[in-house]
Image (cartoon, rainbow, N blue to C red):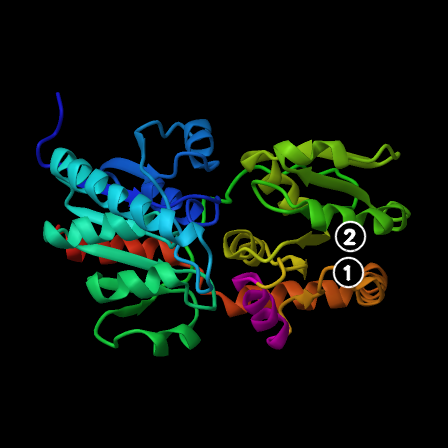
Amino acid sequence: MADKNRKRIILVGGGTLGSVSPLLAIARKYPADYLFVGTENGPEKHYLSSHGFDNFLAIKSGKLRRYFSWQNFWDIFRLILAFFQSLKILLKFKADLVLTAGSFVAVPVAWAAWLYRVPIVAHQQDVEIGLANKLIAPLAKKITVVFSEQEQYFSRKKVLLTGNPIRDLDFKQAKDFAPCVLITGGGIGARGLNDFMAPFIPRLLEKYQVYHFLGEKNFDQRLDLDGYHPIKFSAQEIIEIMARADIIISRAGMSLISEASALRKALVLVPMSASHQERNAAFLAKHNAAFMVRQGNYQIMDRYLDKLMSNDDLRRALGQNLYQLFPQNAVNDYKILMDKLLKK
């Protein structure tokens, strides 16, 4: 029999897994009845299902570009349709709270929640404030941020420094394993990163095993070399290898960076060009918490790999700097915040 006193919470995000991971981390630790609202074609439904989270609904998702595109006109209609879908979902689910961690699919849900007077919490992961959160911020009850430098962009009455919620990393690690490097472009993969790293993999194999996580559509880019392990993306498997890795080479999504921080790992970030990831990577590089390499800059990548492969102290220092940059109790801070908003 359902508990009538149990709170009902809508989580909303998607398109990529970056906006999904922190929400799932919160849901695992905070007892409530949850509904996840995401995109129709993103990877989030499969990802959530693989983690035993099947209460999922998809709505139309558009994107307001900051440049002229004929697609903007079509996306306006998608946004309007998504708003009416959101009104219906909120009316039926009777949510007590809406949580989002970015992604444009959250905008119509936030608008609908505001009309129904349902409190909204918006989480800002990336260093650069995205357009979705700029639109949601005036409606939100609270806005949580990862770094103190982000607080200036939001109302003092609303903003709260929490860090980035991450999944539980407390698991049994293999004691005997060969030194290894992890390469990943994230949950949906990155063809450009895979092509860029291909010439460096034989050199890495001189000292390390290389675990290369490729997206489902990018598995054709795998190599055939001894000590090289191509893997289709698996959320559980990647965290186990992250925990073992001496070096992690990745895109600059904040969810993976946050987990690498908790594990004190040396990061080489190759951000997606002309995106928020460049700001993330530059911010970490400025604080000596990671190396940043622009895709295509083979000379810089060669130099950084040479330093990291030959200097254990440098790898440890990068990992420690990364750890110290991030608040490490984000999920607990979120539980306290949610209790206050839900008056528990």
Task: Please determine whether, in this image, residue 211 is positioned above or below residue 273.
Answer: above
Label 2 crowd bin: few (<14), some (14–19), many (20+), radius 10 Å: some
Residue 28: quadrant of the picture: top left
| Label 1 element class | loop
Q: Nearer the viewer, residue 84 or 299?
A: 84
- State the quadrant of the N terminus: top left
Q: Which residue bears the numbered disc 2?
A: 196
Q: Amino acid at mark 1?
A: Gly
Q: Is residue 7 visible?
A: no
Q: Pinpoint residue 131: horizontal percent, then vertical percent.
A: 38, 63
Q: Nearer the viewer, residue 66 or 279?
A: 66
Q: Which residue bears the numbered disc 1?
A: 296
At horizontal 46% and vertical 62% (from top left) the residue drawn is 68
Q: Pinpoint residue 112: horizontal percent, then vertical percent.
A: 18, 49
Q: Nearer the viewer, residue 232 or 66?
A: 66
At horizontal 74% and vertical 32% (from top left) the residue drawn is 220
Magenta-tinted stretch:
275-287
Task: Please determine whether, in this image, residue 48 is positioned above or below residue 285.
Answer: above
Label 1 crowd bin: few (<14), some (14–19), many (20+), radius 10 Å: some
Horizontal side of residue 78 vs 273, given as left or right:
left
Horizontal side of residue 82 vs 14, given as left or right:
left
At horizontal 35% and vertical 79% (from top left) the residue drawn is 152
Kindly indicate whether the residue at mark 1 contacts the one at mark 2 (C-beta within 8 angstroms): yes
At horizontal 28% and vertical 70% (from top left) the residue drawn is 159
Q: Tell me, yes or no, whether the highlighted magenta stretch contains residue 189.
A: no
Give the Cα distance between marks 2 and 1.
6 Å
For the stretch drawn in magenta, what is the main secondary structure? helix
Q: Pinpoint residue 103: horizontal percent, then vertical percent.
A: 39, 52
Q: Amino acid at mark 2?
A: Phe
